[in-house]
Image: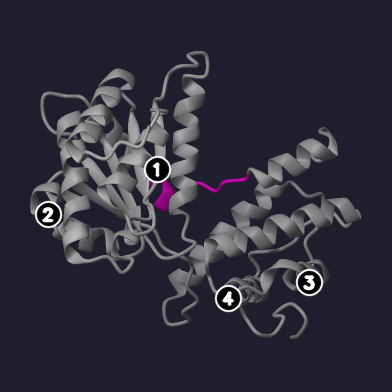
Amino acid sequence: MAEEISLVERIKMIENLYIITPEIKQALETIRICRDSGYKPYEPYCMTIEGPFGSGKTELATRVVQGILNDYAETQSAIKAVLLTTPVNPTEKKLSQEFFFGLKIPFRGRTDAHIMAETIKRNIDYFRPELIFIDEIQHFFDGQTSRLIISACDHLKQIIKQSSAPIILMGLDGKVAEFLELNPQLGSLFINTHHMKNFNWDEKKPESIRYLQEFLFHVEDGFHLKYPSNLAETSMAQKLFLASKGVKRVLMRLLIRAAKQAIQSGEEKINLSILSQVWLQIGRGPGSSKRNPFSFG
């Protein structure tokens, strides 16, 4: 396959690689149930997605939204899926602004919470988006007073209950559940929770190591390099774990950059030399290994 497509196409394929793990399959099925429940006589089966930093929550939502939008590409006016981000220190006004932006509604400095909620409801009724993701729910706890948090929480409940739109809340582990506890009536709308996770390396739990190795096997297979890189080999897998601290986003950033360099250099495989160079270029972020894990042992 590597000889049948152009360099530009190969690079694009590598940059767009997305591995459907069993965890992602389960998440997609739960999202499907949520999506199918919208705009029925009963309240929608809203859901939450929680996970640590870099575990793939936002990327999953982005790909689901883009897939739905692609299905309606010929209908340019359709807003059939929306990915919103909870603003820092959210208030009723800030939260409404995010909905207005996602639904392409002119904001015009509106301030009345009830009027803003009614406007959002009318536009949701008109466009009937099949999914609305709201990411970074932990921002509700950015130093806000309890009164402001509860007020914004009530505002969101009003929008959801009035519109019957299928909503997915996303955020860091524990924070989405903590948010929903502030309003039991809002919390009752969220039927399912899916937990994303990063990788772990625990020799007392060999399944954790196998999970990473299986992922690396599929990544290497998806890169379609001409020669084996043996990413799933135990020694290499451990080095990759050390370099990324098991964070999926960091791991994929390293591997994608390394695969592109392997093609551009003519090596056509990811080796320790390439990984060492890439780690020096982009791998030394907060929390990463202080030593280059590809330059020793």
Looking at the rendering, in which quadrant would you find the C terminus? bottom right
**Do the residues bearing badges 2 and 4 touch, measured as CB atoms within 8 Å?**
no
Quadrant assignment, res 230: bottom right
Eye-nearest disc, 2 or 3: 2
Question: What residue is drawn where x is 38% and y is 55%?
Answer: 136
Q: Which mark is residue 286?
A: 4
Q: Which element type, helix, strand or loop, lies under badge 3?
A: helix
* Mark pair 4, 1: CA separation: 26 Å
Question: Going from the N terminus, do you reach mark 4 or mark 3 first?
Answer: 3
Q: Three-letter amino acid code at disc 2?
A: Asn
Q: Residue at x 46, y 50 (%)?
A: 58
Looking at the picture, how far across and down is residue 38, in whole percent?
Answer: 23, 28
Q: Which quadrant is the N terminus positioned in?
A: top right
Residue underneath mark 2: 183
Q: Which residues are magenta?
A: 17-29
Identify the residue under disc 3: 272
The amino acid type found where label 1 is placed reads Leu
* Earlier residue among tags 4 and 1: 1
| Residue 125 rendering spot, x and y as whole percentages | 25, 22
Q: Secondary structure at mark 1?
A: strand
Against 93, residue 107 (above or below) is above
